[in-house]
Amino acid sequence: MKKHKDQNKITERNRNKGMEQGFSFFTFNFSLKKYLSLFILYFSLFISAQTQTENYVLSTTCLTADCVKRMEVIQYSDGLGRPKQILNVGASPTRKDVVTHIEYDGLGRQVRDYLPVPQSGASTRNIYPAANATNASIYDNETIYGEKMMENSPLGRILQQTPPGNAWQGHPATFDYKGNVQNEVLKFTTTTSVQNGANYVQSLAISGHYPAKSLYKNKVTDEDGNTTSEYKNAQGQTLLIRKSVLMDPVEGPSGAPAGPGANLENVDTYYVYNEYDQLAFVITPMASRELVMFQS
């Protein structure tokens, strides 16, 4: 009887062991399938990844949980790691590729900014030739890039900038960098005092003009000839923004129209900082005009 009971225990133990082994095999088999699926997905992405002769970064943004709908952007780079073409895969309304061309001048500066150009053929995910990426026929052969002219200095500041489009060619925006001249910018000072032991009161006063060449002056003339000048001190604080606007037209000699700039008026906005380098006052154009008239 005892021998029979021992035999039953051995049989039960073997059955449990077999179930454990079967469960372990099922878990291993399930894990293997899971990782195999991930490997196949990764490998399929790898083998469809365009070219083996170009440097690129593929970015995928999933639009659905299963990533069936997604946005793909491929950025191709040159040997120095600089972007040279951006390919939006199937991004046009007809599911064609949209390509943005990037180029550099002899000093490595990006002086032309090209508009994106949709392609006509099916997507190959490969880099497109420059002739395809800069084909202007989709834009009715308009100028499809904005162009910058930069100074030949380590600062690389922009001197002239032209937007895309044939209508803007010959009407660039220009940039000028210089210092202020004598009696050009009013100088304000502030005084901070305490009243009743708690309230801080700030007063404002005019203390002449800034000396010549003591401020940085950056002047921008837009495509329509309007100018904006920004004056900054050595700390980089903006002290004055001056816009020159054309007021009501006036007549020149013998009733003829006035020449260019005959009725330009400055519209000034002053920014005044206290002794703690905090912005304390903003003087509006109307108030600035009254102050200038008072000073004169």
Image: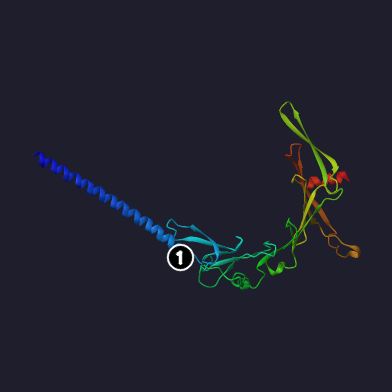
61 or 282, which lies in front?
Answer: 61
Q: Whole-percent x and y of residue 132?
A: 59, 72
Task: Give the residue at mark 1.
Answer: 47
190 or 234, which lies in front?
Answer: 234
User: At 41% from the left edge and 59% from the top edge, which residue is drawn?
Assistant: 39
Q: Please indicate whether residue 111 sits to the left or right of residue 121 in the image.
A: right
Which quarter of the image is occupied by the N terminus?
top left
Q: Whole-percent x and y of residue 228?
A: 77, 54
User: At 43% from the left edge and 62% from the top edge, which residue is drawn?
Assistant: 43
Q: Is residue 252 visible?
A: yes
Tell me: residue 101, above or below residue 7.
below
Amino acid at the residue labelled 1: Ile
Q: Secondary structure at mark 1?
A: helix
Q: Is residue 162 visible?
A: no
User: At 22% from the left edge and 49% from the top edge, which residue is drawn?
Assistant: 18
Residue extending furthest toward the right: 254
